Every structure is written in C-alpha cells, then in structure tokens.
Amino acid sequence: MIINEITAKEAIVKSKLPSADYVVNSYTGCTHKCIYCYAEFMKRFSNHSENWGEFIDIKTFDKIRIPKNIENKYVFISSVTDPYNHFEKKYERTKQVLEILINTDCNIGILTKSDLVLRDLDIFKCFRNIEVGISINTTDDNFRKIIEPKAAGNR
C-alpha cells in the first residue's frame, strides 16, 4: 500500500452528483480493493501509477472552510472512498470535518464498510438530520476475500 499525505484546497466541495449538494472525500484512493468499485475512475486525478486499491492519499486541510448557504444542503461524506478506512483511526480526517459541521444545519450522509463509524456516534447526535449507511455485501467471509480482499472481515 502506497501512503501519501497531500494538501488539499478544500474539504467540502460542491458536488456534481444529483443527490448531493456537497461532498467530502478526506482520502483519495481506498484500502478495500473491491473488484466492483465504481470509484476507480478517480485514479486519473491522482497522478498514481499503482492500481486502485493499492494507494491512499491522506488529505490535509490548512483550514476547513464551510461553504456559504450550507444550511439545509445535503453533504455526502465520501462519495469515492470509505471515510472510515483504517487510516481514519490515526488521521481522523472525517472526524475533523464532522466536528466543523456540527454548528451548521446541513444534512449529512455517510456510507462506509467499517465499524470505526461507531467512534463518532456522539458527533452524529449533534446533527438534526444525518444518515449513516453500512455496506455489507456478503456474510460469507471466503467470498468477501475474493470481492473485497482488503475490507474488514467478519469478526
């Protein structure tokens, strides 16, 4: 796994997705290496020659700026990476953004495969409207090792 820390201009970015006003992707790349990943196209923006799933860039933000008029807007946390990948435990980039957004009245959506999401339950309680989705693709750990070789397994 190739690991880089990079400086990003913005943490909360205007979205081109029809279902989200803003997105937050605190990491570029993903640690799960899922064979069905739709986000592999992001590699062309990363200057990496490694295969998707073999690198991760951990973004650093000088200052997390909250966009004007974010009230009642939908902020999707991690549209092209897992916000609670195992590097989040050390770097807490997703947690930092959530803490900045606490005093806003935006709507939050999060999608992850990781039980690390439980760490931030106290933060989630501060939001009026938040959705947290957990992606579980199979209960067969042998099959999971084929389709999601680096994702967390059954515990």
Image (cartoon, rainbow, N blue to C red):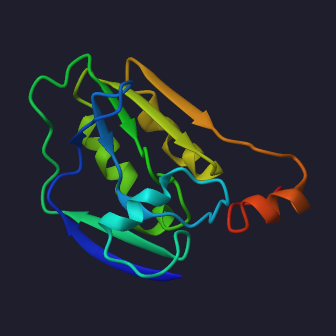
x and y percentages locating residue 60 in the rendered image: 24, 66
Give the position of the C terminus as an image quadrant: bottom right
> Residue 6 at x, y = what percent?
26, 73
Residue at (23% x, 29% y) in the render: 103
Question: Quadrant of the rendered structure where residue 90 is?
Answer: bottom left
- Looking at the picture, tell me which residue is in the foreground, 38 or 3: 38
Using the image, determine if residue 10 lies above or below residue 152. above
Q: Does residue 10 appear in this view?
A: yes
Q: Nearer the viewer, residue 61 or 125?
A: 61
Query: In the rendered image of this protein, does residue 126 appear above or below residue 7?
Result: above
Q: Residue at x 81, y 58 (%)?
A: 144
Image coordinates for residue 96, horizontal then vertical, percent: 31, 51
Quick one: quadrant of the N terminus? bottom right
Q: Is residue 2 left or right of residue 152?
A: left
Can you say whether 125 is above or below 34 in the image? above
Q: How many marks?
A: 0
- Which residue corresponds to the image point at 90% horizontal and 62% vertical from the top-left? 142
Residue 67 occupies quadrant: top left
